[in-house]
Image (cartoon, rainbow, N blue to C red):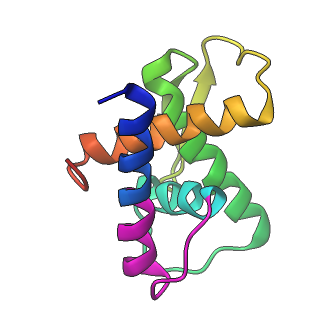
Amino acid sequence: MARDEQLKERWELVVKKLSNQFADGDTLDLDAIIYLIGVQELGQLDREFKKDQKLDLMHIAICKLLVPYGYYELDFVDNDGWPHYKTLAELPNLKAGEQSVLMKEAIVSYFIETEYIH
């Protein structure tokens, strides 16, 4: 199976499983999935977040997702349990479609590593 085709199938599986689990079957978009990963990484699942905290959660997720690509590394976790990452390499200038593919690839890898999908 071609790499792009495999990524597409795995991405669709992630979207379907997360949408059924967290959105009553309504299809979650890329940003919503990134947000969910941020909440998971923070580990404070049963609380509500303010708008700026939601953006911080998305940042946490993006950093976590891009660690395997060498762009970030976990620096420390603060007293409130929030992880902080340091930049190891600047992200390349990617077109919107290329950014989307990179993030989908990273998300699929994340959910394979966490054994959410196979």
Q: Position of residue 19 (x, y in %)?
A: 45, 74
Where does the N terminus fall, quadrant-wise?
Answer: top left
What residue do we see at 42% from left, 22% from top? 68
What residue do we see at 69% from left, 29% from top? 98
Q: Position of residue 43 (x, y in %)?
A: 40, 61
Q: Residue 46: tell me if it is visible.
A: no
Indicate yes or no whether the magenta region holds residue 15.
yes
Q: Position of residue 109 (x, y in %)?
A: 36, 37
Q: Residue furthest bottom?
A: 24
Say which of 16 and 48 sits in front: 16
Say which of 113 and 14 sits in front: 14
Region of the chain picked out in magenta, as a range = 14-29
Indicate yes or no whether the magenta region holds residue 24.
yes
Q: Residue 32: tell me if it is visible.
A: yes
Query: In the drawing, does residue 51 fall left or right of residue 37?
Result: right
Image vertical order of residue 66 relative to residue 39, above or below? above
In which image quadrant can residue 55 be found? bottom right
Image vertical order of residue 67 relative to residue 52, above or below? above
Q: Position of residue 6 (x, y in %)?
A: 35, 37
Image vertical order of residue 25 relative to residue 57, above or below? below
Query: In the drawing, does residue 9 fall left or right of residue 57?
Result: left
What residue do we see at 45% from left, 31% from top? 4
